[in-house]
Image: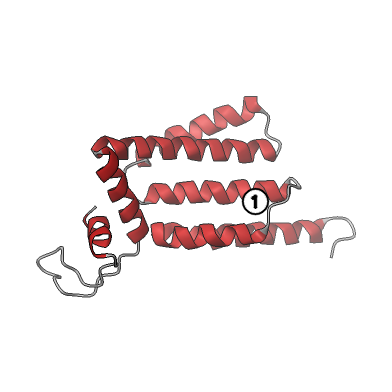
Amino acid sequence: MKTGETILTTGHVPRADDYSALARGRPFIAHEWLASVLFRMVQTAFGWNGLIVLKALTAIAVAGLLYAAARLLGAPPPIALPALAFVMILAAWRFMERPHVLTYLNTAAFLLLLARRRSGRTTPLWIFVPIQIAWANLHGGFILGPAILALAGGGAVSGRLAAPGGA
C-alpha cells in the first residue's frame, strides 16, 4: 500500500528502499508496482472494505473465466461445476488482498483465450501481449504466461505429429 501511495504521490516508481531501517537507501525493485497502485486506488476510493470486495470480485472472475474455458473445451455443466467448485474451495485460502490474486486472474484469462483458439473461435495471438505486459507489472507470477503458451504450443505441435499422417 505504501508503494502505491508513493507512486501516486510522486508519479514515479521508487528505486531506493525507504521502508526498512536496515536496508534504507539500498536499491529497491518494485516489481509489483502496478498491483500496489491498483490496491491503493481501491483503498482510497472505497476504504479497506473495497479491498475485500476487490478480492471477492477477483475470485468470481477467476471462477467465471475457468468455467467458460471448461465449457469451450466441451466439459458438460454437471462435470464442470463440481470440478470448479472443488478447485475454488482448494484455492479459497489463497485469495487474499495480495498481488498474487492477479496472477490467478491472468492465468485464467490465458486459459480462456487458449480454449477459444482451440475451439475454433477467432482469438488473435497479439491479445496475449498487452495482458502479459500488465501481468509483468502486477505480480512476479507473470512467468506463467509464456510457460502456458509454450505448453499449449508444444501440445498443438505434438498433437499434429501424433495424428495420422502427421507432420
Image coords of residue 38 (percent x, y) = 34, 51
Image coords of residue 91 (percent x, y) = 42, 39
Residue 52 lies left or right of residue 128; in this view the side is left
Q: Nearer the viewer, residue 117 or 163?
A: 117
Splitting the image into 4 quarters, where does residue 65 fall?
top right
> Compared with residue 23, is residue 60 higher up or lower down, i.e. above or below?
above
Asked which secondary structure carries label 1, the reply is helix
Q: Residue at x 15, y 74 (%)?
A: 25
Q: The C terminus appears in which quarter of the rendering?
A: bottom right
> Compared with residue 167, is residue 105 higher up or lower down, i.e. above or below?
above
Image coords of residue 135 (percent x, y) = 46, 58
Amino acid under disc 1 = Leu
Q: Nearer the viewer, residue 163 or 45?
A: 45
Q: Which residue is mark 1?
A: 114
Image coords of residue 105 (percent x, y) = 47, 46
Furthest toward the left, the residue is 21
Residue 97 lies left or right of residue 147; in this view the side is left
Furthest toward the bottom, the residue is 26
